[in-house]
Image: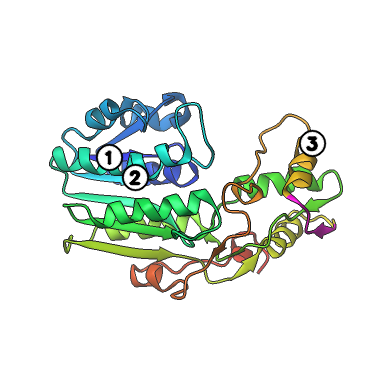
Amino acid sequence: MLLVTGATGLIGSELIKALTANGEAVRCLVRDPRRLGAERVRVQIVLGDLADSRSLANATRGVRSVIHMAAAHHDQDSGTIEELGSIATWRLIEAAEAAGAEHFSYFSALGAGRGADTRLLRDKALAEDAVAAARIPTTTFALSLAHSPLDPLSSAIDACSRLGFAPAPGEGRYQPVWVSDIVAGVLAQLALPSGGGHERLEFAGPQALTTLMMTRLIVSSLGRRRPSLPVSPAIARTLLRATGPGPAKVPMIWDEDALLGASMLSKRGADDLRSLGVEARKFSDVLGLD
């Protein structure tokens, strides 16, 4: 039995589809099972919250492995970034150890560090330390910016460009990596025999791009001619709100409390994915531009 947290997120939703398609027994810790979509009938569901120790104990009971993707990019009613991040990760590791789990995987971010500019990346570093110190074998997947054709960034640029302007807030640099490539890498790593101890893998795409470069590529893939210029986060959010109600949400990299302005680059580039047999695709390839 595999426990997955963050199963309703951008990566998690695709990962559980792949796991169940492979015949894996999957358990999901969720607050709202409806967000699992069709997968809710194919997985075990534990209702709960990362801030609740009883939920973590119930979720880890009898599991062989934990895949921990859930995190908060903003303070929420149920807890702060730290309470739902590094503190919850530490508690989940303790619960997994007590339940006899054999492996723990954690999803972090490239650029995480105790001296990082944002609370999120500083907290990710604390969580990584907790994972590395666990008494069971662990793996940290440190990701650059995950993307898919319908991710929040693409949806927001699509919505804003309909008004005639595509904002590109922030000066961050990323190696965007396609969600399907991330999932393929995770599945390949899970299939390997555990060597014990802690392993840290960096999942990044082959292109290093700024926010402005990604915005211009997305606009081009939409077949539109729109100016794409750097703006402040406040202007970007205002422009998105002006598009009216709809599915588009403020992307994480448009928020000063999350990854705005971060450098999420790997010196190893796409080598860690390649070592698992996954050839990471370029951002422009996924958008159909090459």
Q: Which residue is mark 3?
A: 243
Q: Which residue is mark 2?
A: 68
Tell me the number on the disc at residue 92: 1
Residue 267 higher or lower than 192, as above or below:
below
What secondary structure prevails in the magenta region?
loop
Question: Which residue corresponds to the image point at 63% horizontal and 67% vertical from the top-left?
Answer: 209
Which amino acid type is marked by label 1? Leu
Q: Residues within 10 Å of mark 2 (few under 14, many from 20)?
A: many
Which amino acid type is marked by label 3? Thr
Residue 274: give x, y in percent of width and height.
39, 71
Kindly report which numbered mark, 1 or 2, lies closer to the viewer in this rendering. Answer: 1
Q: Is residue 285 left or right of residue 46?
A: right
Seen from the viewer's position, the closer of residues 114 and 14 is 114
- The magenta region covers 227-232
Callout 1–callout 2 Cβ contact below 8 Å: yes
Separation of disc 2 and disc 3 at Cα?
A: 34 Å
Residue 111 higher or lower than 242, as above or below:
below
**Helix, strand or loop at mark 2:** strand
Separation of disc 3 and disc 1 at Cα?
A: 40 Å
